[in-house]
Image (cartoon, grey):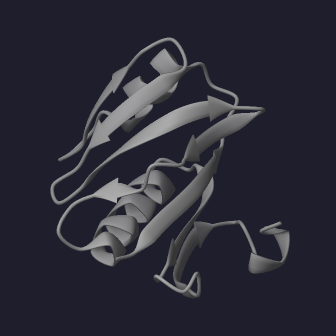
Amino acid sequence: MLSVFGEIDSALPAGDLAELLDAGDWRASSGRYAIRLHGPDCACALEADDGGYLIRDGIDGSDEIAGARSLSGHLAARGLRHRIEVYDAESKLVAYFHREWPRAERD
């Protein structure tokens, strides 16, 4: 079982970010403080946080690493600074995807 955590550095309101992300094979719907994002092979929830958005509940899909890679590519194509980390059952980092977010800034 893998766990996925991520951050998006964006001050856009949820509705505006959802409009930006609703493109190509991806569909986004927003509430006041959250966005539900559905891609070709995964889905996730983005929750508004101080100055950005968090992926806390992981990525729904058959392959978390492929889903994280796909999501990262979608975010990067829209110019969004982000990071997505995938951990194994022992809490070891097994995959890291980002745009302009060096690993040294993780904590």
Q: Position of residue 92 (x, y in %)?
A: 59, 87
Q: Is residue 38 left or right of residue 75?
A: left
Nearest the eye: 67 or 98: 67
Q: Nearer the viewer, residue 86 or 105?
A: 86
Query: Relative to residue 2, is residue 51 depicted above or below?
Result: above
In depth, the one of 25 and 107 nearer the eye is 107
Residue 57 coordinates in the image, percent (x, y): 45, 49
Q: Is residue 14 above or below residue 69?
A: above
**96 on left or right of 72:** right
- If the image is split into quadrants, where does the N terminus sit? bottom left
Quadrant for the C terminus in the image: bottom right
- Residue occupying the point 21% across, 61% down: 61
What's the residue at 15%, 55% (across, down)? 40
Horizontal side of 60 relative to 106 (left or right) equals left
Report the residue that reaches farthest toward the front.
90
The x and y percentages for residue 39 are 22, 50
